[in-house]
Amino acid sequence: MFEIELKPEEFSLFRKYIYETVGISLSDQKSTLIKGRLNKRLNQLGMKSFRNYYDFLVQDTSGEELSFFVSAISTNVTSFFRESAQWTWLESYLPSLIASKREKKIRIWSAGCSSGEEPYTILMFLQHHLSDFDSWDIKILATDISHKVLSHAIKGHYEAKNVEPLPKEIVHRAFDKIRSENGISYQIAPHLREKVLFRKYNLVTDPFFFKNRFDMIFCRNVMIYFDDVTRHDLIGRFTTLLPKGAPLFLGSSESLTTHRETLKLLGSSIYQRV
């Protein structure tokens, strides 16, 4: 594999394009990251310079290469039931949510769902804590900008090492065990997969046109890539989709310094619409 240099003017082009397209803000220090993570891709495509790749990226109207680029420069690290304090809080909040419902209907948005662990965890949580789970109309909108991770999420197929740390009762109710020549793996059971609507969605440029509000929104470890202006705008749009009292979950390393008049911090990066 040939080592291709990333010139400062080429990095500037990538930085401007990715900010305007998906809101990711790249510092000067990210030049080395882009060079390291994309050299293999340039060699695969037979390109001799990063300018060639930039032109290819910008001209690709399918969006496939943009998805690849975003996946390459960001980190898709996730797991089932991550941010344990948030699930503890949600357990205490759930009875009041149920009591407020005139219809047995719950709508949730998992924004930046990556490979699916988050929306499926939400369903596992609800299945475990709702004795009449099957009688509820539950739908989760799960969105991400990457075709690659969405493809994985839709299949709901996970390695044993990712599933076996979960309580056996949850594994039994939520997964089908698959035995093959490669060993044991797990797939989310069909009755749970059918409750998730996976969609490719750009949080920065796609319109926030939704028929209904959401009972809660999860957007964890997504805004760490955004600057203050983009973050402020996104939070404002999330707020319009939450009824009074509904929670917004962020990642543990994320916090808000704005929108204090509409969102109240409850702890563990949980904010409530006021």
Image: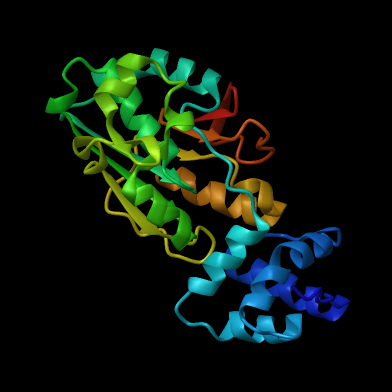
Residue at the image position 68 percent from the left and 34 percent from the top: 253
Residue at the image position 47 percent from the left and 31 percent from the top: 162
Observer-nearest of 269 and 119? 119
Residue at the image position 53 percent from the left and 66 percent from the top: 67
Q: How is the image coloured?
A: rainbow
Could you tell whether 63 is left or right of 12 in the image?
left
Residue 76: image location, x then y, percent: 58, 47
Number of labels in the image equals 0
In the image as oriented, which residue stretches furthest toward the left?
A: 135
Could you tell whether 20 is left or right of 199 in the image?
right
Observer-nearest of 132 and 207? 132
Could you tell whether 211 is left or right of 80 in the image?
left
Q: Quadrant of the N terminus?
A: bottom right
Residue 248: image location, x then y, percent: 49, 35
Residue at the image position 21 percent from the left and 44 percent from the top: 194
Residue 232 visible somewhere in the drawing: yes
In the image, residue 30 above or below residue 168? below
In the image, residue 258 above or below residue 41? above
Residue 51: image location, x then y, percent: 74, 85
Residue 44: image location, x then y, percent: 62, 76
Residue 274 visible somewhere in the drawing: no
In the image, residue 78 above or below residue 128? below
In the image, residue 79 above or below residue 171? below
